[in-house]
Image: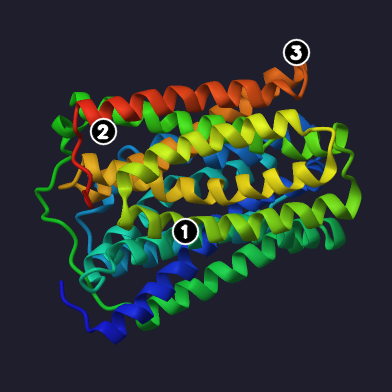
Amino acid sequence: MIIMKTNSKILLYVLMLSTLAINTPLSIVGIISQISEYFNTTIAISGLYVSSFTFTIAICGLFIPILFSKFERKKTFVFILSVFAISNFIIIFTKTFYIAFIFRIMSAITYPAFISIALTVCEDIAPEGEKQDYITRILLGISVGSIIGLPITTWLGTTWGYQIAMSWIFAITIVSLILIILFMPKLEGKSKNYEMPLHRIITKEFILASVAIVMMPIGASIVYNYMPYFLQTVTHIHTYRLGILLFVYGLISICGTWLGGKLITRNDKMTLIIFQLVCMSVFVALYLSADYLIPTIIFFLIFGILDGMGYNLIQYIETSVIPNSPELANGVFLSILNGGIAIGIAIGGFLVNDFGVMSIFTIGTLFLIFAFVLLVYAIYFLKINLKYS
């Protein structure tokens, strides 16, 4: 697969925008009350509607990328973006909750294939020495889609209603579809006889590494998803100040994604190990400084950098332990990321309800300790092969 460098840059940014676009459906978490009002459902049911996207990705990430890997890349991207566009168009205008629910899940089913193949294509077209940079740009598209998408969707939804919020998601999907049609060349997929390499996911190295890194999004999600509640009830940051702080957090986490890619290429082993230690230290610091405004803000923003780095670290480990099957590796990355987030949200809700909000830091730290111990064992005792070591 050979593409001239100038064309590879154009394709990189088209794919980056496209990953941003198909990640914006995650941003409707900010308009749960508007969804509830529009469909005349309870908040709990509306929450299930929102989270169904993440749960579907976590399940389908294990096999959908492999199923799509045999097809020509441009046709695959056009098909998936068309599914997203049609699904979102129907979601905008239907008043029937179950129809909207079905089409939201339908788009989520194809999501892992798009992200996985986009990561694979970018690694293939990247000039020598720039593979991790290209991968990082796609991961930036994922994070920007939810981080920037959240305030935009929330603002549109709370100001003009549910249908307007969903219309902007539809519009950016259409723009991405047009760009793919115009600028993406035809790129062949895998052989028609390509099968899921199950033997690669039953090795001790893969299982141990995957268990280790799923602890990362679980621990981070336990803390991150209940930080707004913590900041309001303990540190007493309210109204627009909280909104500004969360937006700044999002921008900093984007920088963290970029930083993670740079650090991995320089020293992958130390980055993976030190990341856990620094993140644990930040959780402890947030616990101890909870009553003090400025230190809490500083540690929260440091956590934003670490949160952004996590995308790169998880994707890097999976593509290292499954080096010859990038679609499978990237699919597992999406399953671990989204599954970990979903589990973390559930655990965090239980903790806040039964033990108080401060317990999120204790349990979040415990999950990172598990991740640290398992990663040290996998890297230094099992000596798993890392791409840049």
Q: Residue at x 82, y 58 (%)?
A: 161
Q: Residue at x 42, y 36 (%)?
A: 336
The residue that label 2 is drawn on is: 379
Near mark 1 (Cα within 10 A), the count class, few <14, some 14-19 or many ≥20, is: some
Determine contact: label 2, label 3, CB under 8 Å.
Answer: no
Quadrant location, the N terminus: bottom left
SS class of the residue under badge 1?
helix
Q: CA distance from mark 1 to mark 2?
A: 21 Å
Q: Earlier in the sequence, mark 2 or mark 3?
A: 3
Name above or below for residue 135 compared with residue 321. below
The residue that label 1 is drawn on is: 259
Q: Earlier in the sequence, mark 1 or mark 2?
A: 1
Residue type at numbered disc 2: Ile
Residue type at numbered disc 1: Leu
The residue that label 3 is drawn on is: 354
Residue type at numbered disc 3: Asp
Determine contact: label 1, label 2, CB under 8 Å.
Answer: no
Give x and y (percent) for residue 68.
Answer: 27, 52
3 displayed left or right of 16? left
